[in-house]
Amino acid sequence: MRVNKVIIPVAGLGTRLLPATKAIPKEMLPIFSKPIIQYIVEEIALSGFKEVIFVTHSSKYSIENHFDKSFELEATLEKRVKRSKLREIKAISKLDLNISSIRQGEALGLGHAVLIAKKLIGNEPFGVVLPDMILSDSLENKKRIFFKKMKNNFEVNNHSSILLARAPKNKITSYGVAKLKKIIKSEGIKYGDIEKIFEKPSLKKAPSNLFAVGRYIFKNNFFKYLESINPDTNQEIQLTDAIHEYILSENKVVGYIYEDEYYDCGEWTDYLKANLALSFSNKEIKKDILKFLKDL
Ligand code: G1P
C-alpha cells in the first residue's frame, strides 16, 4: 500500500533553546541560509511523499507562512531583478506537496501530537518526521535518502519501520533506545526486527546505543495502540511507549540503521555543527571559516 502522508509535530515550545526560541519557533531558526523546517520538508518531498501535516501551536504560524506563496516578496524581487533569489523563494511554495495543519491545544507529548493528526490520516499508513533532526543523506546525495528507502520498502513489504542511529554514551538517556533481535546486512543496509524500545532509559536500562532518530513509518493499525497508552510521569503520551506495546502485541517493526551524519538541532552543539557543515557547501565561506577557526 502506498504511503503518502507525513505528520510533523511542531507544537513543542523549544525550551531547550531558550531564549532564542522565546518568540521564534525553533523550527524557524536558520541553519546557514534556510530555516530548519525547510530542510525537513524538502527531505520529505524528495522522498516522494505527497502530503505534510503539521501538528502545530498558535505561536507557530510562521512555519505555515514560510511554505505559503508570498506575492509581495516575489513582486519586489522581480522588480529588483534578483532572479536567483526569486527562483529560490518561488521553489519553497512550489514543492510538490500538499501542506495542511492542525492544532495541538495541550502539550501532552509526541504520541498525543500524532494522535491529533489521526483524522487527517484516515485509514492510510503514515510517516512521522521529527523536525529537529537534520539528516545529511538528504543534503549530499539525493538518491541515497534513507526515508525514501523506508517508504519504498514499506510499499513492498507493508511493515512499520523506524530509523535508528548510534548515540554517544552521554546522549543515550535523551532518546528512545531500541534493541534489534538480529542485525541483517543486505545491499549495504543494516536492519532487523525491533525487540524492544524504551523512552529515555537510564544508562543501565538502555538495551543498546541505537536510538530513534526521528523518521518513522506506521501501518494504520498503530493508532489503536497509541490510543490505549497512559501518560507517563510527566503527563505525556510517549510515541515510544506505544511502539513498545505494538511490538509486544506481535506487530513487526523493522529498525533500519542510519550510519551517516545527523544533527540534533534541538541542542546547541549540533545546531552549530549543522550550520558549519551546511555552510561549507559554499567554497568561499568554507575557506574563510576554516581560516577563522585556525586563528581562533
Ligand atoms: C523524541 C522521542 C525520542 C527520540 C527523539 C529524537 O524525544 O520521544 O524517542 O529518540 O525525539 O530526537 P524528544 O527529543 O522530544 O525529547
Image (spheres, grey):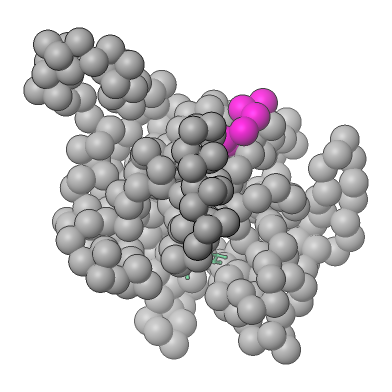
- In this rendering, the answer to whether 212 lies above or below 81 is below
Farthest residue in the front direction?
295
Quadrant housing residue 195: bottom right
Residue 193 in the figure: left or right of residue 243: right
Residue 244 on the magenta span: no
Residue 116 in the figure: left or right of residue 58: right
Can residue 146 be seen from the camera position used here? Answer: yes
Residue 142 on the magenta span: yes
Q: Principal SS element in the magenta part?
A: helix
- Residue at 57 percent across and 56 percent down: it is 294
Image coordinates of residue 149 in percent, x first then y, are 68, 35
Can residue 121 be seen from the camera position used here? Answer: no
- Residue at 81 percent across and 50 percent down: it is 191
Q: Which residues are magenta?
A: 138-143
Image coordinates of residue 51 in percent, x first then y, are 41, 32
Residue 75 in the figure: left or right of residue 84: left
